[in-house]
Structures are given as C-alpha cells and as structure tokens.
Image (tube, rainbow, N blue to C red):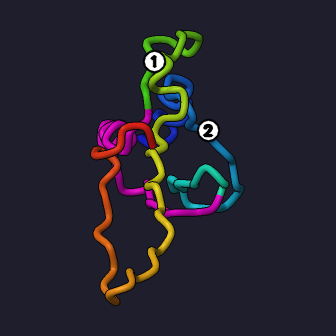
Amino acid sequence: PQVKAFVTQDIPLYHNLEMKHLPGADPELVLLSLRYEELERIPLSDMTREEINKLVQELGFYRKETPDAPVPEEFQFAPAKHLPVLLPPQAPAADGKTPPRHDKEEHPDL
C-alpha cells in the first residue's frame, strides 16, 4: 500500500520521474543515464512512502508543488549530473616526461 500511494500520489509531482507498470514485477526504482542505459535498480517493496520520497529527493529529483507547476530551468535535466570532461591523453614532452594537466578551473574558457 505504501508503494501504491507513492505511485499514485507522489510520482506526478516529480520532474523526470515516470512509472512503467510491469505486471507481476516487484516495484523498483530503475535509474537510467541520459542515453537511457540502466545505471541501478533499487527495490521499493520494503520501503515506506516517506522513505521512497526521501530517496528520490536525495537522488536529485525535483519535486513540484503541483503536477502542473513549472520546473525551474536549473532542474530541467535533474537529477542528471554534469558529465565529467574527459581530456585526451597527452603525449610525453621531448624530455620524456608527461606535461602537467590543468584543471578546468584554471581555464574558464574551456
């Protein structure tokens, strides 16, 4: 009953959280990447409605006041995290040592 209450009453308030009904399957939260690749499955059967709400908020899902409320721009892609910038490997310098890497903060124009 706790999971059912979360599904029917709380899911409509969360941005980027949707319900897929699979007959006979135990309820679980499936986290997907931006490319819809499965990242993690979290069983929900033994959790209370309050615990599930706390979990999805800790995961970064934005909870609206009402189902039709606007979502602030900074939460449009929530809970997606910014992907780390992958720097290409650097070739060793003429002396055989690899030059030091520079952090993004050192070069705000990158």
Q: Which residue carries the number 1 mark?
A: 64
On screen, residue 14 versus residue 57, left or right, reads right
> Mark 1 belongs to which amino acid?
Lys
In which quadrant of the rendered view does residue 36 lie? bottom right
| 78 and 41: which is toward the camera | 78
The residue tagged with tag 1: helix, strand or loop?
loop
Q: Residues within 10 Å of mark 2 (few under 14, many from 20)?
A: few
Q: Position of residue 70 (x, y in %)?
A: 54, 11
For image coordinates 47% across by 74% down, the residue present is 89
In the picture shown, does residue 78 fall above or below 87? above
Can residue 92 be found in the magenta stretch?
no
Q: Residues within 10 Å of mark 1 (few under 14, many from 20)?
A: some
Q: Position of residue 44 (x, y in %)?
A: 43, 54
Q: Is residue 1 visible?
A: no
Query: Most extreme residue toward the bottom, as rendered?
Result: 96
On screen, residue 106 versus residue 82, left or right, reads left
| 75 and 25: which is toward the camera | 75
In the picture shown, does residue 7 fall above or below 100? above
Can residue 58 be found in the magenta stretch?
yes
Q: Is residue 19 visible?
A: yes
| 14 and 49: which is toward the camera | 14
The image quadrant where one finds the C terminus is top left
Return the mark for residue 18.
Answer: 2
In the picture shown, does residue 50 fall above or below 67? below
In the picture shown, does residue 85 fall above or below 13? below
Find the magenta span and give its range: 37-61
For image coordinates 53% across by 36% down, the residue present is 7
Q: CA distance from mark 2 to mark 1?
A: 14 Å
Q: Are marks 2 and 1 in contact (CB under 8 Å)?
A: no
In which quadrant of the rendered view does residue 37 lie? bottom right
